[in-house]
């Protein structure tokens, strides 16, 4: 006779738990007191197994004799999103059902004011700042260069379309490429580097939706896309042509276009299931564009200079993921290549740019007992850069390598820690760094937790400085983040406070008065004597439950930051800093008419700008920016084919927002830099020529 008792870790009996001798039919289930007993004819030794839904399997080797009637099993709860802490300080997870989806692909394209752009949507999350006249993600006092965009673990060299004077540029990638998004506002994993402030992690889809042929038509471009899935492989193809002349003809522009932006491109994605758990993904894209404009330049008599730009961009990435030994080991590897060429002239003077990056990456992860993990990996990059300025060509080559290791430890179901170390070497400055990272999370209730993250983060100086001085050191930022959040019943409350210390920032000494031209090429002597700080807090509330078919979220971010860097003679708040950022996003689904209506209100407090007539450096501030945008999307079926109609209006109140001011060299006059257009509208449609294509309100 074999018998005993099965309980949880607290000693509470588990009713109906299964217990049996492995390799036999001998076994039983527990009664109301957690007791079990059964007979066996086995002899000598055996393995007895106890299991219960929601708990980890427990096994013991026993010697079958007269003393096997008092066996005790205490089972551990299985790790899940309700009973296990999740380390989240400094990161927003999207499209991860275990942590609650924040922003799905259709969620991004139906957010009013985001212009169907991934980075545009991220600007409405806490920690991000809105800087309207230049591209990039500005996070918690960081510049746009301090954030890296990563696709399937691979750094994207050119995530935005080519920079233009005082014109914000979109991201290059379609939101529907990705199944998940993690927007880190600091304290991120040791797996990633070369970013002082933030990383935006994008994970591509593993399989096409088999939607067949699709056609997109709008006021800016026309395109076709094709998705098809086989048993173990799938393919997605996209081709498009765009010309903004028709749109600009009806939407008044604040930019004097001589040749409106014209662009075309294509992409191809192939996915192959290589084994039971293995997936190979290959993605390639190519685009080229052409435009011409008169850009304002107060330093010349005419007040404007003609800019011509032709851009060619190519990006290819392939990744292989797999796991074996029942998931105890997993592999994540990748290879990518990117190449970008800007043939650019200012009044016939060549200012061309060229860059390319080749990279490889391997990460191995080992799953340990108790849901603990350890990973280690490395990456290598070959980077080539060129810049032509006034007839002089500057060249730069960097061979960058990194190695990292990180372990996630669950001390209890309520307390977890992540400890990591990253080391990087850059050949262009011939320096090595060591960057420790750590995070801890404590579960304070079934649905709430506290998280803490800290670490050091390094980044190479701006390549424009390295053209002239290769003896510079890494720039550094130290992060400290404390987070509290509650996720319950499709509602999220989150508050996070942070402190960043900047060190080894590049300073430039010209011996001349401060030059506010953001596009100037640095020529002065440089060193790493700069410093700075950023501190503040973020608030986030999202409710998808209270009102049926209504989803809304509110964010508020406060940041206080000062730096001594670049041409600064004294510590001051940089021009890309706004102390207060507020977003209110609402989305309502109307079931009867299959329509989603979205409205966004965004507020950005005034930013510093350089006034040569003020003895106090960067003490003048622009007016606050207000923007109200609306968007509507309607689902419709035409002969069994799904059609999505959409329309949006940006800055519906036609507020004359100002982003910054620029002065003439004598300081006697200035002009305002604002949006490309004060109020704009956009309409279009997506046709899916397949009866298999499905979209529901849950996708919005």
Image (tube, grey):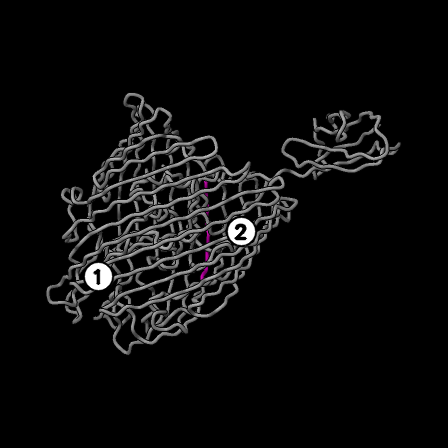
Lower sequence index among marks 2 and 1: 2
Q: Position of residue 605 (x, y in %)?
A: 30, 55
Horizontal relation, residue 85 to residue 525: left or right: right
Q: What residue does disc 1 label?
A: 661
Q: Nearer the viewer, residue 678 or 421?
A: 421
- Give x and y (percent) for residue 486: 50, 42
CA distance for labels 2 and 1: 47 Å
Q: Which image quarter: residue 429? A: bottom left
* Label 1 environment density (alpha carbons within 10 Å; few <14, some 14–19, many ≥20): some
Left or right: residue 21 compared with residue 291: right
Residue 686, image x and y in percent? 28, 33
Q: Residue at x 39, y 61 (%)?
A: 383
Q: Is residue 412 above or below residue 515?
A: above
Q: Furthest residue to the right? A: 66
In the figure, is residue 625 to the left or right of 93?
left
Assign the magenta stretch its main secondary structure: strand
According to the image, label 2 marks what residue?
363
Number of numbered discs on residues = 2
The residue under the point 17% across, 49% down is 260
Camera-side residue: 667 or 565? 565
Q: Residues within 10 Å of mark 2 (few under 14, many from 20)?
A: many
Q: Position of residue 693 (x, y in %)?
A: 36, 28
Query: Start and end of the magenta stretch?
Result: 491-500
Q: Residue at x 77, y 29 (%)?
A: 35
Toward the top, the furthest residue is 639
* Image side of residue 7 versus residue 337, left or right: right
């Amino acid at each position: 006779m074999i018998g005993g008792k099965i309980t949880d870790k607290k000693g509470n009996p588990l009713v109906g738990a299964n217990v049996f001798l492995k390799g036999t039919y001998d076994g039983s289930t527990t009664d109301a007191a957690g007791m079990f007993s059964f007979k066996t004819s086995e002899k000598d030794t055996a393995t007895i197994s106890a299991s219960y839904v929601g708990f980890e399997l427990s096994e013991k080797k026993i010697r079958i004799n007269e003393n096997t009637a008092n066996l005790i099993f205490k089972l551990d709860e299985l790790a899940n999103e309700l009973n296990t802490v999740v380390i989240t300080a400094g990161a927003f997870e999207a499209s991860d059902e275990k942590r609650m989806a924040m922003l799905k692909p259709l969620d991004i394209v139906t957010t009013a004011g985001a212009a169907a752009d991934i980075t545009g949507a991220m600007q409405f999350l806490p920690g991000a700042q809105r800087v309207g006249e230049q591209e990039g993600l500005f996070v918690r006092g960081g510049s746009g260069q301090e954030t890296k965009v990563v696709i399937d673990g691979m750094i994207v060299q050119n995530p935005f379309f080519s920079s233009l004077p005082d014109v914000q540029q979109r991201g290059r990638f379609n939101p529907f490429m990705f199944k998940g998004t993690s927007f880190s506002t600091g304290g991120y994993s040791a797996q990633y580097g070369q970013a002082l402030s933030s990383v935006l992690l994008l994970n591509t889809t593993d399989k096409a939706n088999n939607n067949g042929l699709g056609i997109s038509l709008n006021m800016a471009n026309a395109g076709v896309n094709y998705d098809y899935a086989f048993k173990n492989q799938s393919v997605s193809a996209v081709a498009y042509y765009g010309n903004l002349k028709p749109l600009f003809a009806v939407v008044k522009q604040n930019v004097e276009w001589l040749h409106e932006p014209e662009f075309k491109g294509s992409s191809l994605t192939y996915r192959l299931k290589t084994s039971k758990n293995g997936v190979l993904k290959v993605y390639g894209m190519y685009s080229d564009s052409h435009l011409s404009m008169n850009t304002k330049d107060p330093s010349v008599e005419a007040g404007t200079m003609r800019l011509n730009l032709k851009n060619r961009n190519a990006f290819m990435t392939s990744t292989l993921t797999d796991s074996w030994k029942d998931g105890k080991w997993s592999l994540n590897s990748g290879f990518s290549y990117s190449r970008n060429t800007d043939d650019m002239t200012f009044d016939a003077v060549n200012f061309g740019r060229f860059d390319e990056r080749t990279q490889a990456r391997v990460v191995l992860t080992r799953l340990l007992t108790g849901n603990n993990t350890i990973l280690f990996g490395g990456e290598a990059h070959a980077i080539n850069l060129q810049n032509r300025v006034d007839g002089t060509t500057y060249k730069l080559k960097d061979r960058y390598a990194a190695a990292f290791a990180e372990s996630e430890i669950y001390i209890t179901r309520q307390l977890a820690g992540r400890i990591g170390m990253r080391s990087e070497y850059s050949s262009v400055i011939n320096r090595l760094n060591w960057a420790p990272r750590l995070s801890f999370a404590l579960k304070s209730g079934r649905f709430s937790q506290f998280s803490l993250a800290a670490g050091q983060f390094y980044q190479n100086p701006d390549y424009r400085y390295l053209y002239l001085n290769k003896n510079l050191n890494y720039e550094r930022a130290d992060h400290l983040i404390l987070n509290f959040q509650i996720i319950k019943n499709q509602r999220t409350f989150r508050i996070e406070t942070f402190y960043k210390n900047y060190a080894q920032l590049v300073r430039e000494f010209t011996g001349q008065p401060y030059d506010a031209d953001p596009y100037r090429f640095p020529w002065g002597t440089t060193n790493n004597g700069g410093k700075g700080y950023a501190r503040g807090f973020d608030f986030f509330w999202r409710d998808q439950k209270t009102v049926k078919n209504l989803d809304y979220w509110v964010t508020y971010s406060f940041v206080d930051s000062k730096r001594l860097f670049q041409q600064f003679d004294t510590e001051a708040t940089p021009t890309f800093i706004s102390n207060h950022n507020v977003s209110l996003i609402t989305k309502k689904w109307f079931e009867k008419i299959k329509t989603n209506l979205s409205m966004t209100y965004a507020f950005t407090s005034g930013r510093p700008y350089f006034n040569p007539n003020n003895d106090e450096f960067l003490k003048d501030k622009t007016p606050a920016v207000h923007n109200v945008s609306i968007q509507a999307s309607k689902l419709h079926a035409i002969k069994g084919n799904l059609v999505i109609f959409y329309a949006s209006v940006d800055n519906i109140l036609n507020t004359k927002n100002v982003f910054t001011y620029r002065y003439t060299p004598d300081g006697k006059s200035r002009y305002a830099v604002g949006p490309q257009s004060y109020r704009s509208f956009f309409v279009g449609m997506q046709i899916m020529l397949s009866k298999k294509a499905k979209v529901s309100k849950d996708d919005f």
